[in-house]
Amino acid sequence: MGALDDGHFDEELENGLVLGVCSKPEIEKTKIIEDAVKVLLLGLGEDINREGLRKTPFRVAKALREGTRGYKLKVKDIVQSALFPEAGLESGVGHAGGVGGLVLVRDLDLFSYCESCLLPFQVKCHVGYVPSGQRVVGLSKLSRVADVFAKRLQDPQRLADEVCSALQHGIMPTGVAVVLQCSHIHFPNFASAFLNSNHQGWSKTVVTSGSGVFEDEKEMIWGEFLSLLKFRGIDIDNTGSRISGDGCWCPSQNISTMEPANSEMIAAVTSIIQSLGEDPLRKELLGTPTRFVRWLMNFRNTDFKMKLNGIDRCRNNPFGSNGHVEESIQTELNLSLWSQCEHHLLPFHGVVHIGYFGAGIDAIGISLLQSIVHFHGFKLQVQERLTRQIAETASVLVGKDIMVVVECNHTCMISRGIEKFGSSTATMAVLGRFATEPAARAKFLQSIPPSNTGV
């Protein structure tokens, strides 16, 4: 019978490719996660059998397993096979080579899942050490060790401390220094998004950790470390606030709501945390299921219908100074967008640009356009469908000749095996004259400013 009889199976992807071999316990844990995701989807009022959601439980389970694989890895296995002899200076006064010469690896892109809300956060990691014992470690191993601890449910300071401690014990250097620049998506809730169109999308912080000669941040060696960062334009004093005391950087900790969370959904999230290899009763994780469920409920499926009554009063005078109907292209740019990927249950965010023919709209009309974007955004979505829906609904307000461009950063592009940091996705929808007039499309596209949707 083969693999299954031996307690293993080839994990089949949705396109029929084979990912690898998993043990029966891993199969069982994956099944628990998939069942939990189905409970969450049902709690959102979704049909788990509809096209687009049928494979979501599998995709979410796969992403979570990949994103928390660090629980199964050991630093010792990574480091000990990559220590190499390297002599220090043979003569003279100074430090270099395998004794006393600072080694720094900058700009390591990592991601981790926030232990407070289960949303991924991005990490720019800078790690250095001062060799001792006339030996050095392979540079790629610094990145791999950092990734071991990043691929767990984490807090920025603990992540920095664990990377620092692991390298200190694994390499036995004179000292280790770690600097992390962390960016956590700050997702508004449904109500606040309508009230505040200028919502800031990211919470940022900088954390440091040091051992040996780096234990005291006032020591000169820290100044040298930070100077090497500044050579690359990295100034940690201007990239985010520091976490102090028992403070928490996760935006979910600052959201207060009296709305009771669905107990079945909370139990489902608890089972996910346990299946990933964590203890749901750990102090830092006790409130995580409730916070995640309350955030997820922003995207519940409702029967609300958007009614655009009395829209004529939002249009400016349709006639130009010569008495003829205005035929120029009007634009409304950089409308904020927040949404949730229905394939992976991960957020995406960005901006929407709308172009249309005729007279412009007043402030009330612009506010309605932003409301249209939020109305379609706060659902389980795919960007292609979202773009079309915005265009079709907005055409009632601004006319049938309309073009919509949506630019978004997708968390699923960094928090799965792809890990494409800095990538973004653009989609278009064209109706009426924009569909038949290339010159009109080109003119509108030229009016869109440089993108600033990233971190």
Image (spheres, grey):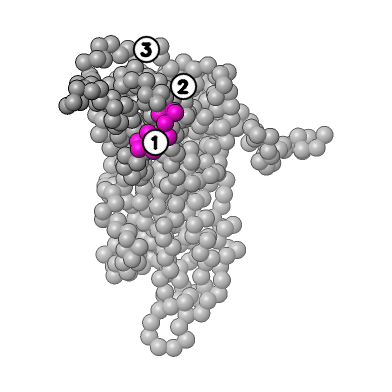
Q: Which residue is mark 2?
A: 265
Mark 3 or 2 closer to N-term? 2
Q: Position of residue 276 (x, y in %)?
A: 53, 36
- Residue that sits furthest to the left in the current view: 321
Closest to the camera, between mark 3 and mark 2, is 3
What kind of residue is marked 1?
A: Ala
Calculate the distance from the C-alpha at mark 3 to the C-alpha at mark 1. Answer: 35 Å
Q: Is residue 396 left or right of residue 342?
A: left
Q: What residue does disc 3 label?
A: 305
Q: Which residues are magenta?
A: 434-444
Q: Position of residue 372 (x, y in %)?
A: 33, 22
Q: Secondary structure at mark 2?
A: helix
Instruction: In the rendered structure, find residue 241 and report the number of the disc placed on it.
Output: none
The kind of residue on which mark 2 rests is Met
Question: What residue is pinned by disc 1?
Answer: 439
Disc nearest the viewer among 3 and 1: 1
In front: 40, or 430?
A: 430
